[in-house]
Image (cartoon, helix red, strand yellow):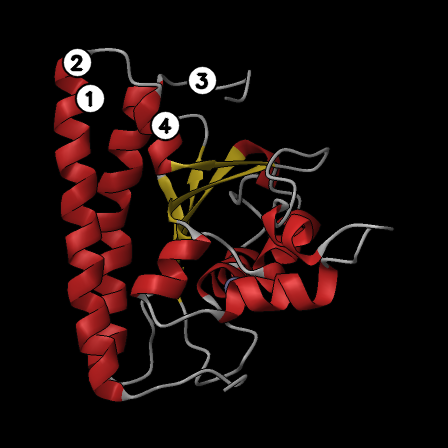
């Protein structure tokens, strides 16, 4: 865990889930209903009081660069400079572990963290999106000398902790919750959010919006 957390892990996870259900899910649901959104969402919160700065979701039918995270970064920088917090003073929340485009956008924008609910494997297995992993593997995973293809496959996809940011999954936050009652409650709440996204994905599939890479 990061050593600069101003809030307990319990409070962080609770607020992240509340932020998703209050802001990200309704926005995503309405965009999907309009036929122009995908389930991938993001939000930026102030570290100080965990209040929302901006929430967005994927609209890559408009432009292939507007993934949930990049669209959120774009909207963040469209806010008036006055009153807009520094990225360093914000938490970056994302429903799905960022792809290489979004990892870079988060890095280049100066956010020093991100937190995600679904892993790349979840995106591949539950959200019809094998491309996040495929692109990282194809573009960035250069073979080390003498390394077998099996060993290369087993390597971590990217550095979740590096000099620019620290990436943390909701599952890791949950592991660090010490109070048994809180842990139980937050586990149920996390499972409910997973169900919410499974349902949103069912709605998205009706729109038959694919990926540019297909
Ligand atoms: Zn992305």
Residue 91 visible from this viewpoint: yes
Q: Going from the N terminus, do you reach mark 1 or mark 3 first?
A: 3
Task: Report the disc number at residue 180.
Answer: 2
Q: Going from the N terminus, do you reach mark 4 or mark 2 first?
A: 4
Cβ atoms under marks 1 and 2 closer than 8 Å = yes
Task: Report the disc number at residue 1.
Answer: none
Q: Going from the N terminus, do you reach mark 3 or mark 4 first?
A: 3
Neighbours of disc 1 within 10 Å: few (<14), some (14-19), many (20+) = some
Cβ atoms under marks 3 and 4 closer than 8 Å = no
Neighbours of disc 4 within 10 Å: few (<14), some (14-19), many (20+) = some
Name of the residue lying farthest toward the right: 145
Q: Which residue is pictured at 61% across the width and 68% down the height?
A: 135
Residue 40 visible from this viewpoint: no
- 164, above or below 59, in the image: above
**SS for dot 4:** helix
Between marks 4 and 2, how big is the CA–CA gap? 14 Å
Q: In front: 90, or 195?
A: 195
Cβ atoms under marks 1 and 4 closer than 8 Å = no
The residue labelled by disc 3 is 6
Between marks 1 and 2, how big is the CA–CA gap? 5 Å
The residue labelled by disc 4 is 173
Between marks 3 and 4, how big is the CA–CA gap? 14 Å
């Amino acid at each position: 865990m990061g050593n600069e957390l101003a809030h307990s892990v319990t409070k962080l996870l609770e607020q992240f889930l509340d932020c998703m259900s209050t802001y990200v899910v309704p926005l995503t649901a309405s965009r999907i209903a309009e036929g122009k959104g995908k389930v991938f969402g993001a939000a930026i919160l102030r570290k100080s009081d965990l209040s929302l700065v901006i929430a967005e979701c994927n609209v890559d039918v408009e432009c292939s660069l507007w993934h949930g995270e990049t669209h959120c970064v774009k909207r963040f920088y469209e806010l008036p400079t006055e009153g807009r917090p520094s990225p360093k003073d914000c938490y970056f929340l994302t429903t799905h572990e960022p792809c290489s485009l979004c990892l870079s956008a988060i890095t280049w924008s100066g956010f020093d963290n991100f937190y995600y609910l679904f892993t790349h494997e979840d995106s591949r297995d539950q959200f019809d999106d094998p491309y996040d992993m495929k692109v990282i593997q194809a573009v960035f995973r250069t073979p080390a000398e003498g390394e077998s293809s099996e060993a290369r496959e087993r390597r971590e996809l990217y550095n979740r902790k590096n000099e620019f940011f620290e990436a943390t999954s909701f599952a890791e936050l949950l592991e660090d919750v010490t109070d048994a009652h809180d842990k139980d409650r937050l586990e149920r709440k996390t499972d409910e959010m997973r169900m919410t996204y499974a349902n949103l994905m069912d709605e998205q599939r009706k729109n038959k919006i694919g990926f540019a890479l297909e």
